[in-house]
Image: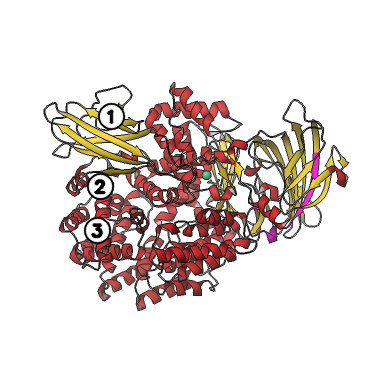
């Protein structure tokens, strides 16, 4: 029996088994009587058969979880027990008529909901989270995105405790009731799947503004937050208005309701949620003022506000048929928010940071036992598939389509997609079909990007024929095997290239064949379709240096035979900002990997003079974009370096990086100091590009200087900490101090705590900074911090800030005796029952275990096995652990 239940619990769902629903819902009437422990939900839906005839043939199966069924009526008649079947995840009715009204009353307990899915409490207020499968924790319902209905929602609650009552759409009524209660009635005119349903009830401050749409309609904008946060909403509101305008200009998309609401809650599993007309946000992505939020926080807010707003079209008006199509809305919407932020900030720097996320996290996922295609073929727990592959690689696929079709062709495609599928639940194939039809082209081969997992690798070789003045680039593509996919078919890969002459100028380009290749004369997009192809460039007057994969035109790894000198040349001259940066990164990767070997062989490391002088050149270059200069001065991340190693050695990587940082600091101390001083903020704090760039450059100089481990520099750092008028500078100084065992460290940490202990988002920074410290005492500190009032195992932000951050502190997490692993496994087990989604995210730190040395491998494996053997393991954790061990 137990075994059978486990089988059911860990059942694999396959895309190939998709069947349209047997029944559709036309309208839903919900009535909530809100109570912290016993909320009653009365629902009434009109159900219609989705076949010619259903009667007596198809059972009507509704999903339900953690519900107490109070009453059940069909067309007004109470159903007797033999007329339905009920188990712990469903309610089945048979037989039912072709069209009927179903009335269900359920009781739920929001205060016991620690999974934060369904109806739950955060800070004493009610809120919901229904994506992907949370609505079934509210009432019995066919909880799948291809069932779309018009919702009417009535909320009843205590007027003093919950003066604000919100749901999707427009407010159509409100008033007093007896016993100090009141009600509000909402109607959403757009049919939607249950995952986009939301309600909020609480004592909240409201910040208001308006937006006039391109057709002249006035939209009321509101942000709801806890009363004490009302001074932290201005930036989110400005971001919202910018996003609304941008979507009109860039995609021709206009907002469709009279009101748009954002609510911030402190307890939230993800970043935010695009519920129709009522977005619910993790407060991290709403609340900000200069004293509490860093530049990165401000940018995160604008990006996430944009992301959720853009979902109104790419997700809500046109939604997904099933969860295998998740990237239809997420990949597309991430691309939209990335592009929005490129337009609002510095496009090159934004692109670099997005590629960094892809390389560090998605390439890793692609190389792990959890590797899956952007459109997965199967899953056990859908919550485990909200991944960097579905989101960020998915966004890269949309970006490639735009490169292939050109901006105008891409826009024709999105226009057709939105008009053709408005109000429907569709598939990725439908999206591609709209792109094809609008552009009269064939994307058959491109579809493989959605079906095949793994990161393709390009091997590029070149040849110059001085006699014929012809240059040839030969590109070979391969893709490593991934679970269930031993061999891959070649992809259609757009490779943007430029050729630089001896002076570093772009050569004007033509290709000798086909009209298929596009060029803006200095950058040409090669369409690699076969396993190996050679592209010929005629009329090239001298042997050029190639700039390959400009702006990272495809999510691939490139191997070329470019020399260090050529990388230096590109770093100094490439007209493509991304490749200028990437050339420097590749140099640094080569250098660091050599140092790693030295370290492993016990050799005394030496820093290459050419590297120091190239670094110095960047440092003194006085680039106009200081944010770009900062990323150009940043060494590749430890996890990115690990990707290049057959057997990952976290200690050697850590030591090699530190050696380079310290040597650069020693050799260039005066320059770092001079730049530090000339880039101080004057005047009030501003979040514009120039100010952000200046602060980032100044703070990276400080971080290098701190490597010197000198009292004078520590004093300087402490001064910055004390005098900082904004959180960016304060956190920058605190984070670097946290790496050194000194009195300044403890003084600054203590003072930070005293100043900010009342502000949870700021305390998250305090927790992370300590969890990321490279001190050998870090694990102990983390354990102590778990008992601090600033921490709670129940709050996802806190768990991420402390435990999540520790698991990304590679050198400490991978401590050779395995104490970091034991700690993480203990926490996974503790959180497993509280919040399976969060536990599953934490346990993912173990998925790469096979890439480490024998000793670490065995230690990690033992922890995975210990977790797997634990009783009551959630489906979420079970799926990741069992796939990792397979
Ligand atoms: N759909 C949300 C987004 O990306 C993410 C999310 C998924 C939030 C599941 C909560 C639960 O915009
Ligand atoms: Zn999204």
Marks 1 and 3, how far apart at CA: 38 Å
Q: Determine whether 835 is above or below 491 in the image.
A: below
Whether pointer 2 and pointer 3 mark residues with C-beta atoms closer than 8 Å, the reply is: no
In-front residue for pair 48/528: 528
Q: Look at the numbered disc 1 and give the secondary structure of its residue.
A: loop
Colour pattern of the rendering: secondary structure
Name the residue tied to disc 2: 583
Return the disc, 2 or 3, that comes first in the chain's sequence: 2
- The yes-or-no answer for disc 1 within 8 Å of ligand 2 is no
Of marks 1 and 3, the one in the foreground: 3
Return the disc, 1 or 2, that comes first in the chain's sequence: 1
Q: In the drawing, does residue 852 fall left or right of residue 502?
A: right
Whether pointer 1 and pointer 2 mark residues with C-beta atoms closer than 8 Å, the reply is: no
* Magenta span: 102-117
Identify the image quadrant of residue 147.
top right
Marks 2 and 3, how far apart at CA: 17 Å
In-front residue for pair 447/24: 447
Residue at 37% x, 32% y: name it. Answer: 403
Q: Look at the numbered disc 2 and give the secondary structure of its residue.
A: helix
Image quadrant holding the N terminus, namely bottom right
Name the residue tied to disc 1: 520
Marks 1 and 2, how far apart at CA: 22 Å
Name the residue tied to disc 3: 594
């Amino acid at each position: 029996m137990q075994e059978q239940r486990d089988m059911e619990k860990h059942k694999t769902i396959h895309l190939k088994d998709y069947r349209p629903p047997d029944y559709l819902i036309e309208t839903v009437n919900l009535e909530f009587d809100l109570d912290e422990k016993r909320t009653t939900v009365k629902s009434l839906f009109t159900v219609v058969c989705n076949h010619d005839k259903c009667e007596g043939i198809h059972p009507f199966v509704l999903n339900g979880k953690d519900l107490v069924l109070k009453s059940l009526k069909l067309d007004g008649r109470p159903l007797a027990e033999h007329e339905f079947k009920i188990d712990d995840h469903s309610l089945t009715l048979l037989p039912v008529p072709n069209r009927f009204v179903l009335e269900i009353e359920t009781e739920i307990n929001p205060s016991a909901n620690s999974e934060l899915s369904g109806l739950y409490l955060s800070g004493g207020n009610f809120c919901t989270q229904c994506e992907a499968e949370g609505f079934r924790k509210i009432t019995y319902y066919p909880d799948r995105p291809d069932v779309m209905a018009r919702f009417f929602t009535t909320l009843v609650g205590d007027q003093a405790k919950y003066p604000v009552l919100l749901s999707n759409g427009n407010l159509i009524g409100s008033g007093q009731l007896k016993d100090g209660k009141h009600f509000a009635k909402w109607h959403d005119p757009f049919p939607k799947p249950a995952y986009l349903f939301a309600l909020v009830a609480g004592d909240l401050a409201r910040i208001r503004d308006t937006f006039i749409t391109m057709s002249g309609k006035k939209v009321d904008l509101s942000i709801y937050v806890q009363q004490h946060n009302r001074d932290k909403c201005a930036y989110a509101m400005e971001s919202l208005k910018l996003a609304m305008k941008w979507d009109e200009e860039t995609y021709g998309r206009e907002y469709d309701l009279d009101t748009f609401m954002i609510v911030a809650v402190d307890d939230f599993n993800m970043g935010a949620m695009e519920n129709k007309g009522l977005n619910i946000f993790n407060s991290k992505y709403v609340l900000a003022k200069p004293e509490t939020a860093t530049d990165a926080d401000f940018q995160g807010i604008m990006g996430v506000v944009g992301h959720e707003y853009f979902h109104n079209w790419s997700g809500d008006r046109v939604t997904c048929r099933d969860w295998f199509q998740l990237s239809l809305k997420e990949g597309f919407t991430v691309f939209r928010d990335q592009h929005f932020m490129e337009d609002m900030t510095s496009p090159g720097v934004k692109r670099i940071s997005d590629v960094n996320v892809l390389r560090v996290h998605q390439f890793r996922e692609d190389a792990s036992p959890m590797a899956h295609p952007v459109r997965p073929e199967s899953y056990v727990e859908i919550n485990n598939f909200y991944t960097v592959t579905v989101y960020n690689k998915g966004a890269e696929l949309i970006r490639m389509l735009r490169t292939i079709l050109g901006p105008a062709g891409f826009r024709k495609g999105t226009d057709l997609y939105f008009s053709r599928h408005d109000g429907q639940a569709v598939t990725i194939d439908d999206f591609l079909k709209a792109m094809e039809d609008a552009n009269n082209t064939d994307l058959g081969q491109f579809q493989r990007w959605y079906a095949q997992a793994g990161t393709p690798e390009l091997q590029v070789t070149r040849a110059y024929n001085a006699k014929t003045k012809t240059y040839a680039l030969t590109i070979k593509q391969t893709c490593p095997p991934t679970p269930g996919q031993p061999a891959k078919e070649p992809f259609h890969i757009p490779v943007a290239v430029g050729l630089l002459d001896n002076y570093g100028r772009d050569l004007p380009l033509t290709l000798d064949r086909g009209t298929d290749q596009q060029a803006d004369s200095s950058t040409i997009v090669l369409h690699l379709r076969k396993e190996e192809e050679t592209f010929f460039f005629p009329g090239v007057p001298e042997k050029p240096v190639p700039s390959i994969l400009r702006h990272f035109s495809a999510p691939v790894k490139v191997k070329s035979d470019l020399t260090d000198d050529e990388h230096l040349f590109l770093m100094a001259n490439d007209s493509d900002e991304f490749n200028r940066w990437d050339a420097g990164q590749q140099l640094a990767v080569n250098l660091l990997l050599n140092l790693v070997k030295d370290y492993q062989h016990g050799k005394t490391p030496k820093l290459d003079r050419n590297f120091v002088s190239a670094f110095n050149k960047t440092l003194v270059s006085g680039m106009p974009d200081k944010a770009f200069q900062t990323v150009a001065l940043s060494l590749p991340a430890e996890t990115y370096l690990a990707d290049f190693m057959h057997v990952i050695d976290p200690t050697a990587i850590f030591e090699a990086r530190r050696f380079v940082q310290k040597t650069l600091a020693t050799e260039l101390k005066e320059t770092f100091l001079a730049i530090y001083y000339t880039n101080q903020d004057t005047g009030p704090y501003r979040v514009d590009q120039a100010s952000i760039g200046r602060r980032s450059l100044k703070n990276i100089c400080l971080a290098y200087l701190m490597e010197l481990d000198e009292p004078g520099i520590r004093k300087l750092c402490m001064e910055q900490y004390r005098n900082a008028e904004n959180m960016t500078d304060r956190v920058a100084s605190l984070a670097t101090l946290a790496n050194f065992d000194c009195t300044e460290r403890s003084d600054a940490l203590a003072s930070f705590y005293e100043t900010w202990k009342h502000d949870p988002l700021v305390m998250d920074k305090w927790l992370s900074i300590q969890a990321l410290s490279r001190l050998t005492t870090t694990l102990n500190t983390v354990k102590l911090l778990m008992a601090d009032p600033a921490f709670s195992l129940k709050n996802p932000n806190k768990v991420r800030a402390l435990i999540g951050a520790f698991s990304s502190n590679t050198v400490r997490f991978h401590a050779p005796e395995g104490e970091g692993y034991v700690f993480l496994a203990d926490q996974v087990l503790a959180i497993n029952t509280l919040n399976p989604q969060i536990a599953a995210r934490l346990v993912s730190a173990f998925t790469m275990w096979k890439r480490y040395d024998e000793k670490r491998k065995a230690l990690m494996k033992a922890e995975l096995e210990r977790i797997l053997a634990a009783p009551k393991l959630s489906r979420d954790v079970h799926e990741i652990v069992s796939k990792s061990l397979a």
